[in-house]
Image: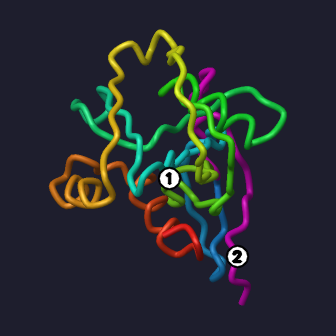
Amino acid sequence: MSETILQISTKVVYDNPWMTVREDEIERPDGSRGVYAYADKPDFVLIIPMEDDGFHLVEEYRYPVRRRTWSFPQGTATAPTREEEAGIELAEETGLRAAHWRLLGVLDNAHGLTSQRFHVYLATGLERGQAVREHTEQDMRQRWVSRGEFERMVRAGEVCDSSSVAAYALLGLTPESG
């Protein structure tokens, strides 16, 4: 018996500039058929801007969950490489520029719902500049927190973005970073 699910057909049920929702007819390993719906979204970058054993975070209103939340800077930008994309996002959201970049890993973002992945970068050697936020980020705030304060914020539900928490776990698993 095969261990893969086969795609029999696919159709787009919704499409906009940010995502495509697909509905696929599938065949499971046992031969039974079903339907699988998921969102195709572009990959994104998440940046851990680390300085003085702490991190720069951003906070904004997240419409789907109807509240403000803190997270590491993240997003998508048009750039030739993921590292350049990370540099653009970091500068836009925080005004920071990094002298040193390190790819910590690539993770799936809700692998049961979307094809989207995220590339986690550690940014160090930070230099301050002016943030140039997109219109949709006009309510964004930024602040530096110590590592202990970050962990307290996670436990208190102030940082509840799963991508940020997973990225922090990657940082802790990375030699010479955690």
Q: Is residue 138 left or right of residue 150?
A: right
Span of residues in magenta? 1-24
Q: Secondary structure at mark 1?
A: loop
Front one among 74 and 3: 74
2 or 1: mark nearer the eye:
1
Q: Main secondary structure of the magenta part?
A: strand
In the rendered image of this protein, does residue 167 appear above or below residue 67? below
Magenta-colored stretch includes residue 110: no
Residue 116, position as x, y percentages in the image: 61, 48
Instruction: Give the residue type that dot 1 points to.
Output: Leu
> Compared to 15, does 117 lie above or below?
below
- Pick the front one: 12 or 58: 58
- Evaluate whether residue 63 shows in this view: no
Q: Where on the picture, by quarter, is residue 77?
A: top right
Q: Residue at x 42, y 52 (%)?
A: 52
Q: Which residue is mark 1?
A: 113
Residue 152 in picture, x, y percent from top left: 20, 58
Q: Which residue corresponds to the image point at 32% horizontal and 27% vertical from the top-left?
A: 60
Amino acid of disc 2 = Thr
Query: Which badge, 2 or 1, is on the more N-terminal residue?
Result: 2
Instruction: Give the residue pinned by disc 2.
Output: 4
Give the structural element (helix, strand or loop) at label 2: loop
Residue shown at the point (49%, 59%) measured from the top left: 167
- Please, which residue is most extreme toward the bottom here? 1
Residue 92 in the image: above or below residue 71? above
Furthest toward the top, the residue is 135
